[in-house]
Image: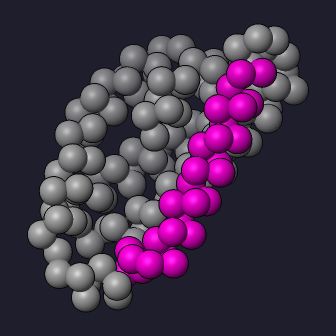
């Protein structure tokens, strides 16, 4: 989500008054990502397996995320160079797909206390750029 937040001016240009609020909200939430990682280190392996956080299931989720992130980065390059409306639409679409892949991972992680706040923030971003 960091990549999306850093580029919110391209994704949500219609409302520049919200950009700083998005940045500040993300700054508040970023430490919770570390909290989630710390929590995962303490979870029993059986619990991770039950939630699809190991093996092929996890590899698939992470692989899809990487594909979507790379597509977003590619489309970001077009918008930074040319900024045409077509490039903006393509960037928004790849941003929405990236947020969808993040949602897939978050659904597996939402047994972790900090996850719900991060999921809600992701929903706000999706509402801003995908609707």
Query: What is the x, y in percent for residue 92?
Result: 70, 36
> Can you see residue 101?
no
Asked whether 44 falls inside the magenta stretch, the response is no
Residue in view at x 20 percent, y 40 percent: 31
Q: Check the image and name the residue furthest to the left.
A: 42
Q: Is residue 25 left or right of residue 37?
A: right
Q: Check the image and name the residue furthest to the top.
A: 81
Q: Is residue 111 left or right of residue 86?
A: left
As rendered, which of 10 and 59 lies closer to the eye? 59
Quadrant (top left, top right, bottom left, bottom right) of the N terminus: top left
Residue in view at x 51 percent, y 78 percent: 56
Query: What is the x, y in percent for residue 115?
Result: 29, 58
Q: Is residue 69 left or right of residue 107?
A: right
Compared to 13, does 60 lie above or below? below
Query: What is the x, y in percent for residue 131?
Result: 67, 43
Asked whether 75 falls inside the magenta stretch, the response is yes
Residue in view at x 33 percent, y 33 percent: 26
Compared to 69, does 53 lie above or below? below
The chief SS type of the magenta part is helix
Magenta-highlighted residues: 51-78
Instruction: Please tell me in which quadrant of the rendered image residue 23 appears.
Output: top left
Query: What is the x, y in percent for residue 7?
Result: 55, 23
Residue in view at x 78 percent, y 21 percent: 78
As rendered, which of 1 and 74 lies closer to the eye? 74
């Amino acid at each position: 989500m960091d990549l999306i937040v850093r580029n919110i001016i391209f994704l949500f240009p219609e409302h520049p008054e919200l950009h700083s609020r998005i940045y500040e909200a993300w700054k508040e939430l970023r430490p919770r990502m570390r909290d989630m990682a710390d929590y995962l280190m303490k979870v029993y392996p059986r619990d991770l397996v039950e939630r699809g956080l190991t093996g092929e299931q996890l590899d698939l989720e992470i692989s899809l995320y990487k594909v979507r992130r790379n597509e977003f980065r590619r489309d970001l390059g077009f918008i930074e160079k040319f900024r045409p409306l077509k490039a903006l639409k393509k960037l928004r679409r790849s941003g929405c797909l990236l947020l969808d892949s993040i949602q897939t991972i978050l659904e597996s992680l939402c047994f972790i206390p900090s996850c719900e706040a991060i999921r809600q923030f992701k929903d706000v971003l999706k509402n801003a750029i995908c609707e």
